[in-house]
């Protein structure tokens, strides 16, 4: 099994939608071998992620409470990971702003 997927059942507070989707992305990447989504794989990849996200959320809702909490902290709850994600989002937004304004930049 993919070691990058964190146990989400039994978290306090419960797993967020973002954590569930991040786990689904990791799962779909692992089983498909797609590490970088291209235009030709985007639709199938996103459809698969959405399906796995729904199935995971349903499973977490249907399963009984855990007796023992998970032994690891999900990555999205770690400060260093959250900072890296925020930096990537900010860079992406700045890049899109530059495109929208027609500002020359490098890729």
Image: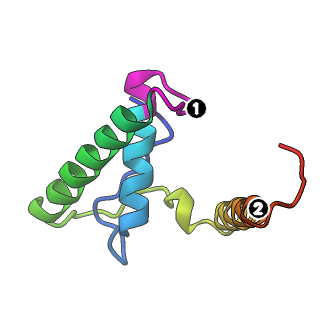
Q: Nearer the viewer, residue 35 or 2?
A: 35
Give the class, few, some or many, for how many residues have Cα within 10 Å of label 2's Cα (few <14, many ≥20): few
- Name the foreground residue: 76 vs 44: 44
Locate residue 35, reporting x and y percent.
55, 29
Q: Is residue 31 magenta?
A: yes
Residue 77: x percent and y percent? Answer: 54, 68
Residue 25 circle label: none
Most common SS among magenta residues: loop
Write down the residue under mark 1.
Answer: 36
Write the residue at 40% across / 23% down: 32
Residue at 32% from the left image edge and 73% from the top image edge: 14
- Name the N-terminal-most of marks 2 and 1: 1
Image point (21%, 54%), residue name: 54
Compared to residue 25, the image places residue 87 above or below, namely below
Say above or below: 7 vs 31. Answer: below
For mark 1, give the secondary structure: loop
What's the CA distance linking mark 2 and mark 1? 18 Å
Quarter of the image that includes the N terminus: top left
Res 12 → quadrant: bottom left
Mark 2 lies on a secondary structure that is helix
Query: How far across and how far down the image is residue 101, in percent?
Result: 78, 67
Q: Where residue 74 sits: x, y (%)?
A: 49, 59
| Quadrant position of residue 92 | bottom right
Which residue appears at 34% of the width and 64% of the height? Answer: 69
Q: Residue furthest front?
A: 102
Magenta residue span: 29-40
> On the rendered structure, is 54 left or right of 95?
left
Q: Which residue is mark 2?
A: 91
Of all residues, the one furthest to the top in this rendering is 33
Specify the farthest residue to the bottom.
Answer: 13
Find residue 41 and report its image quarter: top left
């Amino acid at each position: 099994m993919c070691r990058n997927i964190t146990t989400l059942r039994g978290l306090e507070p419960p797993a967020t939608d973002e954590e569930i989707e991040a786990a689904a992305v990791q799962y779909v990447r692992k089983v498909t071998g797609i590490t970088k989504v291209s235009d030709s794989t985007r639709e199938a990849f996103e459809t698969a992620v959405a399906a796995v996200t729904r199935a995971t959320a349903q499973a977490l809702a249907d399963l009984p409470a855990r007796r023992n909490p998970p032994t690891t902290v999900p990555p999205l709850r770690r400060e260093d990971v959250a900072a890296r994600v925020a930096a990537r989002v900010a860079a992406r937004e700045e890049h899109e702003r530059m495109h929208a304004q027609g500002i020359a930049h490098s890729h």
